[in-house]
Image (cartoon, rainbow, N blue to C red):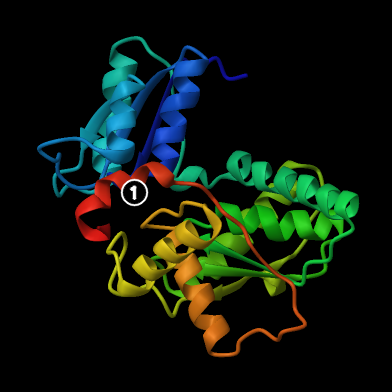
Amino acid sequence: AQGCDHVVTVGGPQSNHCRQTAAAAAKYGLGCSLVLKGNAPEQPNGNLLLDKLLGAHVYWTNGEPPTAVIDNVLKELCTMGRKPYLIPLGGSNVVGTTAYVQAMQEFMAQLREQNLNIDVIVHASSSGGTQAGMVLGAQVYGFRGQIYGISIDRPASDLKMQAAALATATATHLGLGTLSVADRVEVNDDYIEPGYAVLTDLEREAIEMVAQKEGILLDPVYTGRAMGALIDLIRWGAFTRSQSVLFWHTGGQPALFAYADQLL
């Protein structure tokens, strides 16, 4: 609608969002530039390998603030006569959040079709868009259960504020009025150490358990950490036996290949 011909976004070296952005850009004939935090590895693997296969131009921050690198990329593209569109970290804006509002609509339809009742949804939460869309979608489509975000890397207070603000902005964007969902944003930040993308024993256990018991692959950054937290919370009695708990898988399996030496 804005006539843009090139997308720019930012993330970590194994960012699922960046890889998906590169794939979407390739499908629709758009240019794609990715600003990745850190330094270029000797050999690309996992999502980074896919980024390159998908034709994305990769820029590394090399210790610089990501915003400075993004600004330079945008200026360079404009100088080249391109019209870039900037997508924020994790795709967490009103457009990205709207996708998870729609996901909740689909989820509620599946519950009705299968005559299921879910009391708690547990999911990985980081830049806030997933959780914002879920809580807004729950409000719109009548999900009365608990939506419980496992923070991957941010203090709960910061993530709650970000998700609530995104949900409110998205409600306005969708013409839903000034819906307030702040009281429904629940975040657990007990599992953010030892840091982003650092594989822990609990995550390794969760990845192996779910792979070997269910045939489902989790990633070492987001879903592995969130599932590890869920397993730990169950062991500590955070949920009762009568509660139906659903784990919402947010994808990311390609990142597994970047952690082969730590998983095997």
Q: Position of residue 82 (x, y in %)?
A: 38, 13
Q: Nearer the viewer, residue 2 or 35?
A: 35
Q: Nearer the viewer, residue 225 or 38?
A: 225
- In this orientation, does residue 101 appear? yes
- In this orientation, does residue 223 appear? no
9 shown above or below 108: above
In the image, is 136 to the left or to the right of 231?
right
In which quadrant of the rendered image does the N terminus lie?
A: top right
29 shown above or below 195: above
Q: Residue at x 59, y 53 (%)?
A: 130
Name the amino acid type tagged 1: Leu
Q: Dot 1 surroundings within 10 Å: few (below 14), some, or many (20 or more)?
A: many
142 shown above or below 96: below
Q: Nearer the viewer, residue 4 or 17?
A: 17
Identity of the residue furthest to the front in this view: 212
Identity of the residue furthest to the bottom in this view: 236
Quadrant of the rendered structure where residue 42 is?
top left
Q: Position of residue 34 (x, y in %)?
A: 32, 32
Q: Which residue is mark 1?
A: 256
Q: Position of residue 207 (x, y in %)?
A: 41, 61
239 shown above or below 80: below
Q: Residue at x 38, y 23 (%)?
A: 32
In which quadrant of the rendered image does the C terminus lie?
A: bottom left
